[in-house]
Amino acid sequence: MYWHTVTYKTVAVYVVLGVAIIVAALYLIDPNLYTQAYDRFSKTIGTDSDAVPITQTQAKFVNLDGKVQVKKVNSVQWVDADFHTSLDKGDQIQTSADGAARITFADGTTYTVKSGTFITVEENSMGREQPSSSAVHINIGQVDLKTPNYSSPDSKAVVSMEDSVGILHSNSSAAVKADPDKKENEIVVSSGSAEVQRGQEKVEIGAYQKATFATGGPITKSDVLAPPDLSSPRNFEPLIVENPKEASIHFEWKPSSEAVSYTLKISATAMFTKTVKEVSVKGTSAEVTGLDGGDYFWTVTATNAKKENSEVSETFRFTLVAQGKTQEMYLEITGTQIHGRVAEIIGRTEPGAAIMVNGQPVPIIGGDGAFRHFTEPLEPGQHTIVIIGQNRRGGTKQQKVTIVVPK
């Protein structure tokens, strides 16, 4: 009798080979068997190619300042909002007198809930190849909203009040106020366009126009004063000074038509719940002292001869940096690259140094001091990128590079 030794590995190979031959034979006999089997499997596990994960259809907080509370639709308790809080239809949000919040919906629309405001989320729908729609109801207070470039012309952002509705179109921004005590409401459009509806009445308003309406009264449309364009300090610009507290910071903006005075506001928070400086001037510039080192945000409001105020200008951010006593520091920019609308800054500095690019910290610096940083998306045209560094000895250095973002 002769014996032949066969390993388990050899047996497994023969089994796999046999299964493959059977599967191939079945496919040659009827290819549709595979399609039918896959469809049954997909239904069994609940696969839906058109379904959008719930995390993509929920609204979320992207900025929180001061006291902001949320009451979920299925709850009776108010809880403090945080960045992990997701918002669904029927949820309520309220901000205190020193609180504010910015909410981003799935389609990119942002709603900024001002201080002392109470709103309810009414809609947040977004499907593949379907128009998106977001909506909130203002019980009292003010909401500023901004819409992106919608992929569908039927997409919209809505703010409703007691008996009226404001609908914002693509690439638009507006401020919506509701005062149930005075029974007064208004919508001011700062860019793009909007439609105000109440019953059968509809009014279209464009940039720098306002629609006002009291409860039960007609909708009144009027022009408003345009806010000024900000010039200096540039957005995200770092300012290096010997002593921030004693330094005189120069602010400048472009004149606004019909304006006779301007109000400059500086805050340490992006939501402007706390103002550290407020200056009123008749010209288009101001000198401000007394600021500590750190990040700041600034805006300007115009006022005309009738004492009417414009909406707040665009918000610019700057960083005030104290010049170190030891000024020797190595910082070199070795290259730049453009990726669409984003600029990549490549450089080298001292190990352990801190680097900021246009006011944004560089999170990763190699052990040899090498770093790469990608900026925020930039508008087409020429830009000056400011890079500042500070080493462990207190030394600082600044470099500037000019890049051009193609159209």
Image (tube, rainbow, N blue to C red):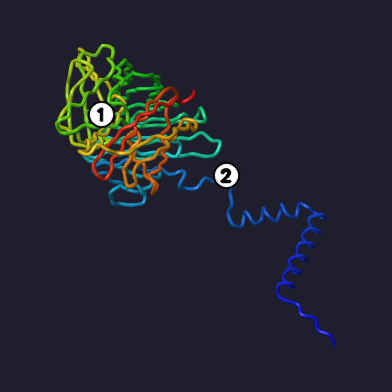
Say which of marks 2 and 1 sits in front.
Answer: 1
Q: Position of residue 164 (x, y in %)?
A: 35, 28
Residue at image x 26%, y 26%? 299
- Res 315 quadrant in image: top left
- Res 187 quadrant in image: top left
Q: Secondary structure at mark 1?
A: strand
Asked whether residue 389 is in view, the answer is yes
Residue at image x 34%, y 18%? 209
Residue at image x 32%, y 28%? 235
State whether residue 214 is above or below residue 325. Answer: above
Q: Residues within 10 Å of mark 2 (few under 14, many from 20)?
A: few
Furthest toward the front, the residue is 328
Q: Amino acid at mark 2?
A: Asp
Q: Secondary structure at mark 2?
A: loop
Q: Position of residue 26 (x, y in %)?
A: 79, 58
How many angstroms separate mark 2 from mark 1 (CA)? 44 Å
Disc 1 marks which residue? 298
Q: Which label is found at residue 50? A: 2
In this rendering, would 173 be left or right of 17? left
Asked whether residue 116 is in view, the answer is no
2 or 1: tag closer to the N-terminus: 2
Q: Which label is found at residue 229? A: none
Q: Amino acid at mark 1?
A: Trp
State whether residue 359 is above or below residue 195. Answer: below
Q: Position of residue 158 (x, y in %)?
A: 40, 31
Q: Residues within 10 Å of mark 1 (few under 14, many from 20)?
A: many
- Res 270 quadrant in image: top left
State whether residue 190 is above or below residue 121. Answer: above
The foreground one among 239 and 282 is: 239
Q: Quadrant of the N terminus?
A: bottom right
In this rendering, would 18 be left or right of 397? right
Q: Position of residue 124 (x, y in %)?
A: 43, 39
